[in-house]
Amino acid sequence: MHEVFVEGGLIRKLWSVETDAGPPFRAPRKASSYKRGEPRVCSMVRLPTPEDEDRRRLCRERKVLIMERVQHVNRIKGLLFSQGVSGYEPLRRDRRERLDVLQTGDGRPLPLHLKAQVRRELDRLELLLAQIKAVEAERDALLAVEQTKAPVAPAMLLGVKGIGPEFAAVLWSEGLSRPFENRRQIAAYAGLAPTPWQSGSVDREQGISQSGNPRLRTTMIQLAWLWLRHQPDSALALWFHDRVKRNGGRLRKTTIVALARKLLVALWKYVTAGVVIEGAAMKTA
């Protein structure tokens, strides 16, 4: 593999002995051709700055901690369910008090070692809850600092109804803080770009590429579902309902991906150019 840096970008080219007779010294030629205005001669990767990459860690760490929290909650519920106990919620504040009074399905006290194991699981769970709280505090502090800068993209995102601190932090750190020239680039970066296939008279859509940022793509699909709930009168929500209605109520999941792509482009235009999303409601002060 040979890499050439050009003004903060990275040109990457792979050479194969079996299929590519091009020698490694052609990489500078391709870089020169790209600089002359030939965009198809190679692909350019825009590298994030170390500060931008470090800023992403908060949201990524929170996601890992949330997954670990789910695992501990499920493990505690599974241990208790094996003794016929249901309805116990480990995330409640009185979890330890309720554990002391639990009984098995046939009315016996919980086995001693089982109760000790559940308590150790609660210790781990409480440690995770404290870490999640600390990460969220750092995230909120970072958003507060970003709101004092220009442009105030995080503040603009937080002003849209249905977008909270976590969504705003992920959207800004994973995607909207990067420079994009057009809507195709940002859709491709999120892996939401369509992949049409044509051969002769056959013209078929193969779905989204799924080759971009998976965190941004997952967040946008989640936000698209929430957009229908919090922004029912927006143009994007009306488009979604009209498209589903024309399909006879089918293909909701496919259409929600298209809505996620449209919503990402609309948010990108909103934070970069100030183009207001048509029909979108804003939060009241």
Image (tube, rainbow, N blue to C red):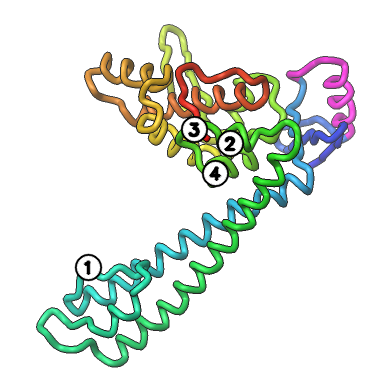
Q: Give x and y (percent) for residue 5.
A: 86, 36
Which one is earlier in the sequence, the residue at label 1 or at label 4? 1
Query: What's the distance in space between the residues labelled 4 and 3, CA to CA?
Result: 29 Å
Magenta-span inclusion, residue 33 = yes
Q: Which mark is on residue 284?
A: 3
Q: Which residue is mark 4?
A: 215
Secondary structure mainly formed by the magenta segment: helix
Which residue is located at x 46 percent, y 25 percent?
A: 281
**Amino acid at circle 4:** Arg
Q: What span is colored magenta in the figure?
A: 25-40
Q: Are marks 1 and 4 in contact (CB under 8 Å)?
A: no
Query: What's the distance in space between the residues labelled 1 and 4, CA to CA?
Result: 33 Å
**Amino acid at circle 3:** Thr
Note whether residue 202 is visible.
yes
**Amino acid at circle 2:** Gly
Which residue is located at x 53 percent, y 62 percent?
A: 132
Q: Which residue is mark 2?
A: 212
139 with respect to 110 (left or right): right
**Disc 1 packing (10 Å; few <14; some 14–19; many ≥20):** few
Which residue is located at x 51 percent, y 29 percent?
A: 192
Is residue 149 shown above or below 250? below
Label 4, secondary structure: give it: helix
